[in-house]
């Protein structure tokens, strides 16, 4: 029997597309960032998302993430509520200090409201289509620091080669490049996680004995190049987007539950400064999305200079109302999304 090459992406024959997400682990994580994809990419190989976790969808009665409305409408009911909670925490902290409470007592008393603030505050991430060295295409989510480093490396590549760093090709005059996303954490605490992005380079010894470093522009797997339109995700469709009024309605539907978990969240009542604090337990999150199957443009002119890269969330908590680190606090996007890995394909 003649051995024929199967070019069709077998995943496209399945009843639905499985979600694959790359996890940035401690150490080195090597990826090729892939071209802009989808009708609304506007030439950007990434998409910025600000996501609200910890709310239950009133329609399904299931916990799920919601896209915040701040970017689209310049206002957010969730951030407004979080800011009210922070103002209340400041006021409570000042009153407790005036009553002679020490830092430990204040921290313990404010644990419930500060945990709720942390759980509701929108998380910012930047999502790329990326391929790892094993040839798997998936979603690569980067925090702001890693995203800015990635853009800097891409700009350097464009200046050095005058080529698209996200190109699917690997020709001398048209090639993408492999990047190394480096994650380090010397203490094990979420807040101490650091990221850096570098181009992958190989050491080459010259004829005269000198050593130089060459960017890794080795090819992507042929299956990725030929089937990118089937493998990539439309980054604009990852999360369901609500209007300000719709998200406000969802928040209001969740208020009875949130107040039960944290009585201090009831802004219609004055908080008791002597009551035992209630720690709000975060809702179990479910992430759902529908990948698109639009084909990428034949010629890609990527954009990587984005004016909205700065994270805009709720106002910072004053020092008089310290946010307490708890087991529910997750400052690292990769760790925060670990639970979502299990449920993406459910």
Image (spheres, helix red, strand yellow):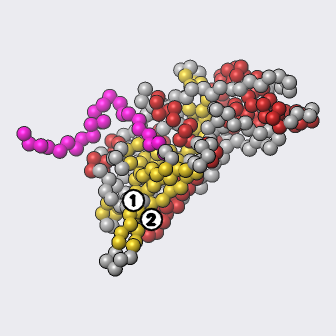
Identify the secondary structure beneath mark 2.
Answer: helix
* Count of marks placed on residues: 2
Image quarter of residue 76? top right
x and y percentages locating residue 216 in the rendered image: 37, 61
The spot of residue 35 in percent (x, y) is 40, 52
Q: State the residue in front, 198 or 258.
A: 198
Answer few, some or many: residues within 10 Å of disc 2's Cα (few below 14, many 20 plus, some between 14 and 19).
some
Looking at the rendered structure, the secondary structure element under dot 1 is loop
**294 lies left or right of 74:** left
Which residue appears at 57% of the width and 48% of the height? 185
Mark 1 highlights which residue? 177
222 in magenta:
no
Q: Residue at x 74, y 31 (%)?
A: 111
Query: Where on the picture, by quarter, is residue 175?
Result: bottom left
* Label pair 1/2, CB-CB below 8 angstroms: yes
**Which residue occupies 43% across, 26% down?**
346
Q: Residue furthest right?
A: 99
Residue 242 visible? The answer is no
Which residue, given by chain and number where applicable, does mark 2 sit on? 157
Let me know if residue 194 appears in the view.
yes
- Span shown in magenta: 1-24
Estimate how packed mark 1 is, as few (under 14), some (14 to 19) or many (20 or more) residues with alpha carbons within 10 Å.
many
Quadrant including the N terminus: top left
The answer to which of 117 and 227 lies nearer the viewer is 117
- Let me know if residue 11 is in the magenta part: yes
Per the model, the C-alpha gap separating discs 1 and 2 is 8 Å
Image side of residue 124 versus residue 155, left or right: right
Residue 47, label in figure: none
Quarter residue 232 falls in: top left
Identify the residue at image location x=55%, y=22%.
62
Q: Is residue 259 above or below residue 67?
A: above
Left-right relation of 96 to 1: right
């Amino acid at each position: 029997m003649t051995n024929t090459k199967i070019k069709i992406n077998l995943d496209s024959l399945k009843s639905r597309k499985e979600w694959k997400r790359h996890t940035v682990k401690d150490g080195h994580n090597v990826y090729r960032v892939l071209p802009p994809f989808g009708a609304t990419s506007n030439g950007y190989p990434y998409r910025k998302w600000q996501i609200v976790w910890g709310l239950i969808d009133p329609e399904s009665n299931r916990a799920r993430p919601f896209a915040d409305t701040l970017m689209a409408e310049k206002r957010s009911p969730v951030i407004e509520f979080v800011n009210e909670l922070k103002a209340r925490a400041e006021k409570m902290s000042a009153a407790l200090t005036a009553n002679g409470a020490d830092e430990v007592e204040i921290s313990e008393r404010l644990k419930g409201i500060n945990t709720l603030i942390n759980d509701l505050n929108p998380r910012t991430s930047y999502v790329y289509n990326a391929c790892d060295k094993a040839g798997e295409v998936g979603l690569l989510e980067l925090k702001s620091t890693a995203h800015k480093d990635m853009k800097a490396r891409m700009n350097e590549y464009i200046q050095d080669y005058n080529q698209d760093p996200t190109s699917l090709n690997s020709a001398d005059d048209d090639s993408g490049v492999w990047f190394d996303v480096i994650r380090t954490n010397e203490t094990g605490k979420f807040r101490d996680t650091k990221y850096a992005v570098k181009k992958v380079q190989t050491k080459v010894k010259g004829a005269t004995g000198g050593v130089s470093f060459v960017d890794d522009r080795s090819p992507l797997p042929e299956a990725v190049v030929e089937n990118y339109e089937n493998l990539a995700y439309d980054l604009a469709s990852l999360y369901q987007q609500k209007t300000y009024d719709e998200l406000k309605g969802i928040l209001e539907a969740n208020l009875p539950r949130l107040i039960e978990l944290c009585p201090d969240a009831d802004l219609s009542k004055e908080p008791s400064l002597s009551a035992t604090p209630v720690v709000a337990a975060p809702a179990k999150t479910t992430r759902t999305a529908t990948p698109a199957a639009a084909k990428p443009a034949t010629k890609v002119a990527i954009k990587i200079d984005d004016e909205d890269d700065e994270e805009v969330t709720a106002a910072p908590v004053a020092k008089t109302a310290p946010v307490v680190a708890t087991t529910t606090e997750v400052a690292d996007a990769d760790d925060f999304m670990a639970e979502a890995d299990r449920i993406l394909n459910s």
